[in-house]
Amino acid sequence: MTSTSNTSLSNGSADEIPSLYGPGKNVKRVRTRHLIEAKERGEKWAMLTSYDQYTAALFDEAGIPALLVGDSAANNVYGYETTLQVSVDELVPLVAAVARSTQRTLVIADLPFGSYEAGPTQALETAVRFMKAGAHAVKLEGGRRMAEQIRALTNAGIPVMGHIGFTPQSEHAVGGYRVQGRDAQAAEVEADAHAVAEAGAFAVVLEMVTAAVAAEITKQLPIPTVGIGAGPDTDAQVLVWQDMAGLRRGRPQRFVKRYAVVADVLQNAAKAFADEVRAGEFPTKAHSFE
Ligand code: KIV
């Protein structure tokens, strides 16, 4: 990911964000329109998940323009096996913590399974809870089948990020973890993308979609596409931070790139601490009070 120079923008009004990158240069909050403007000038951007104070502040300082408090907190925070199990009550405090700990990044709250599918009224009630907790936008899964919900939220002034392709909350309905958009399915994924954009979403996640279909959708839509396992041609990319930083052990999915192995750093620190305690080397006088 390269950062684009600040000179790339035209007339620089007070609240314009010339580039989505550049930590410390601009503490103004990123807004959904900035992400759409980034697409217009061909600037790619990165989104990460975050579920807590420290990663939120670190990623904000690193210049990540959008943070997603994903329902992936189910696996990455709460230790559930799937995202189906996490509740609104469990996600709301995480959204509040991330929003409190950032100055610049756009904070997006994921609506969990069972909290919006019943219809626009249920979706609105849930989204309002997240917005009151400090979110700046919400995300929900589903294309054409969720158009009414997206329209109701945007009409109520709540920015919505769509999520199509492989949608983990409906894993059982789509027959498991599968790449979407191959052969005849391409038209289905494209129809979902257009439905989400027409319903008023400001961006759409494309998960595990073939690179060719994702590239075509990215060309066709006026709103940014955010890829995860969708090839190099989307406007933005998202990864779960524990995958990106290597906190999670085990073989990562094909679409993940590990930029560090934080698991080793943390485990080595824990071992060194335990060794020093056992050997009577910690604490020393320097860590004690007279
Ligand atoms: O919950 C999540 O982390 C997500 C991203 C993978 C897009 O939905």
Image (cartoon, helix red, strand yellow):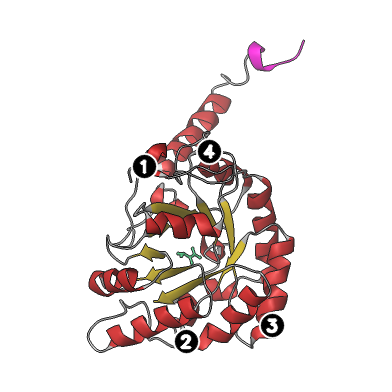
Residue 61: image tag: 4
| 211 relative position to 280: left or right | left
243 to 229, vertically: above or below? above
Viewer-proximal residue among 126 and 8: 8
Q: Residues within 10 Å of mark 2 (few under 14, many from 20)?
A: some
Secondary structure beneath dot 4 equals helix
Q: Amino acid at mark 3?
A: Gln
Q: Residues within 10 Å of mark 3 (few under 14, many from 20)?
A: some
State the residue position of label 3.
Answer: 122
User: Label 2 to label 1, Cα distance in Å?
Assistant: 35 Å
Where's residue 210, x and y in %? 26, 73
Q: Amino acid at mark 2?
A: Arg
Depth check, mark 2 against mark 3: the one in front is: 2
Give the residues in magenta: 285-290
Q: Is residue 288 magenta?
A: yes
276 to 126, vertically: above or below? above
Q: Are marks 2 and 1 in contact (CB under 8 Å)?
A: no
State the residue position of label 2.
Answer: 144
User: Residue at the spot x=63%, y=59% of the render?
Assistant: 136
Depth check, mark 4 against mark 1: the one in front is: 1
